Image: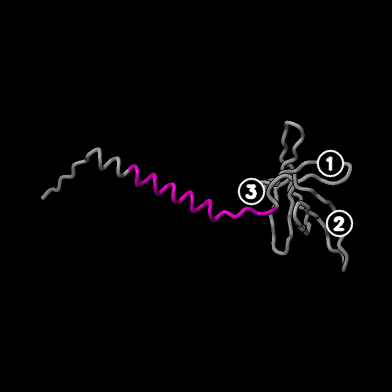
Amino acid sequence: MRIRYRLSSFNVLFAILFVGLGVVVLWLAGAACEKSHPILGRWRTDGPSNLLFEYRADGTVHLIEEMHTFQVFRYQLKEGSTIHLYDGMGRVRVYQYRIDGDEMVYFRITGSEEEVKETFRRE
């Protein structure tokens, strides 16, 4: 016994809408689960250098100069507010960081003292 299935334009339209709705639901669920870390965005260094860096969600840090951007680091956020910055040669710089409002500070702890290495302001 052979069962014949007739493909109508209504069935095709329903299948397309069903698949499209599923894609939209999955996309919205992924966007809702994605948390924005406070380090993401543009940060300008204090002091005479006055450099502008952009921390992106893909784990890269870009230096922004006028109309040009240059990837200068890859970063990983670790436990205990630690950031690992990897340069183009694979060398790593490890800092503790603290974000308080629109200020971010990189520092190292030596003994019981915090040695501030760089201070940034959010753009």
Earlier sequence position, callout 2 versus callout 3: 3
**Which three-letter amino acid code belongs to the residue tagged 2?**
Val
Q: Secondary structure at mark 1?
A: loop
What segment is highlighted magenta in the picture?
Answer: 16-38
**Where's the C terminus, which quadrant?**
top right
Task: Give above or below for 56 relative to 9.
Answer: below
Looking at numbered disc 1 in the image, what kind of residue is underneath it?
Answer: Asn
9 displayed left or right of 1: right
Q: In the image, 123: left or right of 117? A: left
- Answer with left or right where residue 1 lies relative to residue 115: left
Residue at 35% from the left image edge and 43% from the top image edge:
17
Task: Please tell me whether mark 1 or mark 3 is closer to you in this view.
Answer: 1
How far apart in space, not on screen, are marks 2 and 1 (Cα)?
17 Å
Amino acid at circle 3 = Ala
Please give the residue where the numbered disc 3 appears in the rendered image: 57
**Residue 40, image x, y percentages:** 68, 49
- Dominant secondary structure, magenta: helix
The Cα–Cα distance between marks 2 and 3, rounded to whole angstroms, is: 25 Å
Q: Secondary structure at mark 2?
A: strand
* Residue under the image location 40 percent in, 49 percent down: 22
Residue placed under numbered mark 1 in the picture: 50
Q: Position of residue 75 (x, y in %)?
A: 70, 51
In the rendered view, does 3 fall on the left or right side of 94? Answer: left
Quadrant in the picture for residue 37? bottom right
Q: Position of residue 24 (x, y in %)?
A: 44, 47
Residue located 69% across and 57% down the image = 77
Residue lying furthest bottom? 112
Kind of element beneath mark 3? loop
Reading the image, the residue beneath label 2 is 116
Residue 66 magenta-drawn? Answer: no
Q: Give the Cα distance between marks 1 and 3.
A: 23 Å
Residue 5 vertical position relative to residue 93 in the rendered view, above or below: above
